[in-house]
């Protein structure tokens, strides 16, 4: 379809839009910034890539969002297009005062050019198909792989020499018959130990077209990182099994995002993958054995770019698959992506980022210096090893409160309760602590239950040796079966939060940064739903800072992958960040055991 220019004032932004599409529809997709709002009260949702790209991190941090990207989940108050000060208009209008942060410019590095190639017509013309293409695009034979050569004779003749040439830098990725120059797509992938998320983006506009997430199928071979490594250790057959599983899943994801968006997989030319060191190595088929043995050295740390066909990914075979760099055995490309997305390397003040996943990571620092450590949290908060745990999907209990002396549950999509996800788990423990149903050591306190309201008391029980709290009886919140929180579940959460909280405490100690010197604490993790900061504070998952200094930034590792996908400058920046991060090994520190044990307990009310 033909495109035409749409210019939006006062921002002065010009968009290339499809002819016939409404102005509003054209403006949506996070390109015009005219719909910006500032959150005045209520939970500020984690930023999307469009918030980061179009508004810039400074405005995002001040609570600005693009309303076309935000869904209303709770009661909120927002101010529409607020004129904060003159500077704001200038930032959005393009005249940037000195020192104001730049929103990111989209330049994914992939270009497509429509050219008309003159085909040889006479036998004595000493030329070839390849030379004809190289002449048209100004490249040399070294820029073209044998794979692309195989497609040339057909591609050049299908539309009488009219072809679209896709390149990444100087490298020719494909030569396609006809005009396909508007079809430029990429994938940002976060391979976590427990879950894997793939997003499909349009590389010219940065628009997210589809997203899919699922459990990492390697989990059947070990839930946490160490057991995953142990499975692959010194056994090439098992390593191969893990690699096949993850590549199989990524190919399913590719199929699904293409189906959902109508994009053809051959139009995907760039893929950015982030993940912890073990996931990174396994994806590449590199033996992670020594990552699991002291001194936990990774096999490689530098950023790597390879062709999709080398990994058997079913996108364009020549698509560039870019793996972000690694810091250390247990501080992987996912931590680098978090630092990239949260702009910690650019911050004049000291900030802390806590990424809660199966292998949690904590980062602390400013533009002066960054420290990182791994906090091997258990997969509890992603639903694994919890009796009725599940991911943040339809029917997951994601919010728990106590009203009129009894539990009140909220489920995702208001669907019948199926189980409990990470944010629900944290909420449930927080409210039960407040009510006195759980004591500060984490014990379900049956001995003092008579102090509690009858309805809450009737949910606490001991079956055999096991203490538990019934969250939903069959029929309550539509539950088909009883959903309980067991004593063991609470212990799992304590291990997990103990690891994360002690990681943050140790970094603060090593860097000499007391709580009052931490300007901001960012809570990251792919919970899929908002995590209550109040509950996270109540259970001591994060340092006890005043609430306004804490914000939930969503799946920052994925956001970092999306930034590196859409901007080559950001991908270079990731390399600089990785080189600058100082890895701190907690286990080796003499204070660690004591701090960890302390952090396992809950803060006393
Ligand atoms: S409507 Fe254009 S950015 Fe939201």
Image (cartoon, rainbow, N blue to C red):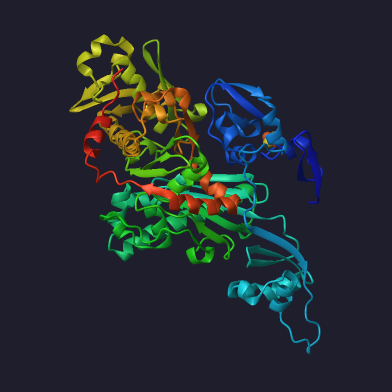
- Is residue 292 visible in the rendered image? The answer is yes
Q: Quadrant of residue 314?
A: bottom right
Q: Position of residue 28 (x, y in %)?
A: 70, 37
Q: Is residue 102 left or right of residue 355?
A: right
Query: Which quadrant of the render holds ligand 1?
Result: top right
Note whether 553 is above or below 170 in the view shown. Answer: above
Q: Position of residue 239 (x, y in %)?
A: 34, 61
- How many numbered dots are placed on residues in this image? 0
Q: Quadrant of residue 194?
A: top left
Residue under the image location 49 percent in, 43 percent down: 345
Q: Is residue 142 left or right of residue 285?
A: right
Q: Is residue 568 left or right of residue 25?
A: left
Q: Position of residue 531 (x, y in %)?
A: 45, 30
Q: Is residue 374 left or right of residue 594?
A: right
The image quadrant where one finds the C terminus is: top left
Residue under the image location 64 percent in, 58 percent down: 110
Q: Nearer the viewer, residue 432 or 537?
A: 537
- Is residue 359 visible in the rendered image? The answer is no
Q: Nearer the viewer, residue 281 or 511?
A: 511
Which residue is the extreme one toward the bottom?
124
Residue under the image location 39 percent in, 36 percent down: 390
Q: Position of residue 516 (x, y in %)?
A: 40, 26
């Amino acid at each position: 379809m033909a495109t035409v220019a749409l210019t939006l004032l006062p921002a002065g932004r010009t968009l290339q839009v499809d002819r016939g599409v409404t102005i509003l529809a054209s403006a949506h997709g996070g390109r015009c910034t005219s719909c910006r709002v500032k959150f005045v009260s209520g939970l500020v949702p984690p930023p999307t890539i469009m918030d980061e790209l179009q508004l810039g991190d400074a405005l995002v941090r001040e609570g600005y969002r693009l309303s076309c990207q935000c869904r209303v989940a709770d009661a909120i108050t927002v101010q529409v297009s607020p004129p904060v000060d003159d500077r704001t208009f200038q930032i959005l209008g393009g005249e940037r005062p000195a020192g104001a942060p730049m929103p990111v410019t989209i330049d994914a590095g992939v270009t497509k050019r429509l050219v008309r190639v003159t085909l040889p017509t006479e036998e004595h013309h000493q030329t070839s198909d390849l030379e004809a293409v190289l002449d048209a695009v100004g490249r040399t034979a070294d820029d073209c792989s044998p794979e692309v050569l195989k497609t040339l004779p057909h591609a050049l003749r299908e539309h009488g020499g009219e072809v679209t040439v896709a390149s990444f830098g100087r490298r020719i990725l494909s030569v396609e018959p006809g005009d396909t120059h508007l079809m430029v797509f990429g994938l940002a992938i976060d391979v976590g130990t427990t879950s894997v998320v793939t997003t499909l983006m349009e590389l010219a506009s940065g628009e997210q077209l589809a997203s899919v997430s699922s459990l990492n199928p390697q989990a059947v071979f070990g839930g946490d990182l160490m057991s995953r490594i142990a499975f692959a250790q010194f056994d090439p057959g098992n390593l191969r099994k893990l690699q096949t599983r993850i590549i199989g899943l990524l190919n399913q994801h590719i199929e699904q995002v293409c189906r959902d968006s109508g994009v053809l997989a051959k139009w995907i030319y760039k893929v950015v993958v982030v993940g912890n060191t073990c996931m990174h190595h396994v994806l590449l088929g590199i033996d992670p054995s020594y990552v699991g043995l002291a001194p936990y050295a990774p096999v490689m740390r530098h950023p790597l770019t390879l062709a999709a066909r080398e990994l058997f990914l079913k996108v364009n075979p020549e698509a560039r698959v870019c793996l972000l760099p690694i810091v250390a055995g247990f501080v992987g490309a996912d931590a680098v992506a978090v630092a990239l997305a949260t702009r910690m390397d650019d911050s004049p003040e000291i900030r802390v980022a806590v990424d809660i996943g199966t292998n949690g990571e904590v980062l602390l620092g400013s533009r002066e210096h960054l420290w990182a450590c791994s906090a091997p949290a258990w997969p509890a908060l992603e639903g694994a090893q919890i009796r009725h745990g599940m991911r943040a999907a339809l029917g997951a209990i994601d919010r728990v409160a106590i009203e009129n002396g009894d539990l009140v549950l909220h489920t995702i999509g208001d669907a019948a309760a199926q189980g409990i996800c990470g944010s629900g788990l944290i909420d449930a423990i927080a409210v039960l602590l407040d009510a006195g149903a759980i004591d500060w050591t984490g014990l379900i306190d049956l001995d003092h239950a008579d102090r509690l309201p009858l309805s809450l008391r009737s949910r606490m029980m001991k079956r055999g040796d096991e203490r538990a709290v019934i969250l939903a009886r069959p029929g309550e919140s539509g539950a088909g079966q009883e959903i309980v929180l067991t004593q063991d579940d609470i212990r799992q959460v304590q291990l997990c939060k103990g690891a994360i909280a002690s990681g943050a405490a140790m970094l603060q100690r090593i860097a000499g940064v007391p709580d009052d010197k931490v300007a901001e604490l960012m809570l990251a993790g792919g919970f899929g739903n908002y995590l209550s900061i109040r509950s996270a504070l109540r259970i001591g998952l994060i340092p006890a800072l005043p609430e306004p200094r804490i914000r939930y930034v969503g799946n920052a590792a994925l956001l970092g992958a999306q930034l590196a996908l859409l901007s080559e400058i950001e991908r270079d920046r990731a390399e600089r960040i990785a080189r600058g991060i100082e890895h701190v090994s907690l286990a080796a520190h003499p204070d660690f055991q004591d701090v960890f044990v302390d952090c396992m307990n809950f803060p006393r009310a």
